[in-house]
Amino acid sequence: MSFATPDSAVIARWGEDATHIVGAVETVVKVVRADKGTEAAPTVLQVLFGTVKDSGFASVPVKNDMFRFDGELYRVYDVKSDRPGGTADTNGLWIHLTFDQ
């Protein structure tokens, strides 16, 4: 699937529930998932796409945050933004996850 980021219509149509966990605080967010890693990070199992505002994040995800998705627990490996200096309204996020071990 190919689409411009960020795009609230894509999140509304294809978004799936995931739980973003920061310490003891859990927030259900909407994300679009791509089930593949990258050559640069072969251990990454999931890639989640969204925007902070449209996905419903209470805070921007950072390395070592946790996600619960489809009953599995994942740790944030890396977070990348579409463009530096943007805002929660304009930035798409690519959130790379790996199984929590």
Image (tube, helix red, strand yellow):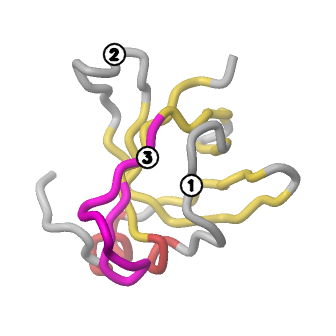
Q: Position of residue 14 (x, y in %)?
A: 34, 64
* 59 relative to 48 in the view: left or right: right
Q: Amino acid at mark 2?
A: Pro
Mark 1 closeness class: few <14, some 14–19, many ≥20 residues within 10 Å: many
Residue at the spot of label 3: 79
- Most extreme residue toward the bottom is 89
Give me the residue at 67% from left, 34% from top: 73
Q: CA distance from mark 2 to mark 1?
A: 21 Å
The chief SS type of the magenta part is loop
Secondary-structure class at tag 2: loop
Secondary-structure class at tag 3: strand
Give me the residue at 34% from left, 16% from top: 42
Mark 3 closeness class: few <14, some 14–19, many ≥20 residues within 10 Å: some
Which numbered disc, 2 or 3, marks the residue closer to the eye?
Answer: 3
Residue at the spot of label 2: 42
Number of callouts: 3
* 58 relative to 78 in the view: left or right: right
- Region rendered in magenta: 78-93
Which numbered disc, 2 or 1, marks the residue closer to the eye?
Answer: 1
Q: Are marks 1 and 3 in contact (CB under 8 Å)?
A: yes
Q: Amino acid at mark 3?
A: Val
Give me the residue at 28% from left, 71% from top: 10
Q: Amino acid at mark 1?
A: Pro
Mark 2 closeness class: few <14, some 14–19, many ≥20 residues within 10 Å: few
Residue at the spot of label 1: 61
In what quadrant of the picture does the C terminus appear?
top right
Q: In the rendered image of this protein, does residue 69 appear above or below residue 7?
A: above
Q: CA distance from mark 2 to mark 3?
A: 15 Å
Give me the residue at 26% from left, 25% from top: 38
Image quarter of residue 41? top left
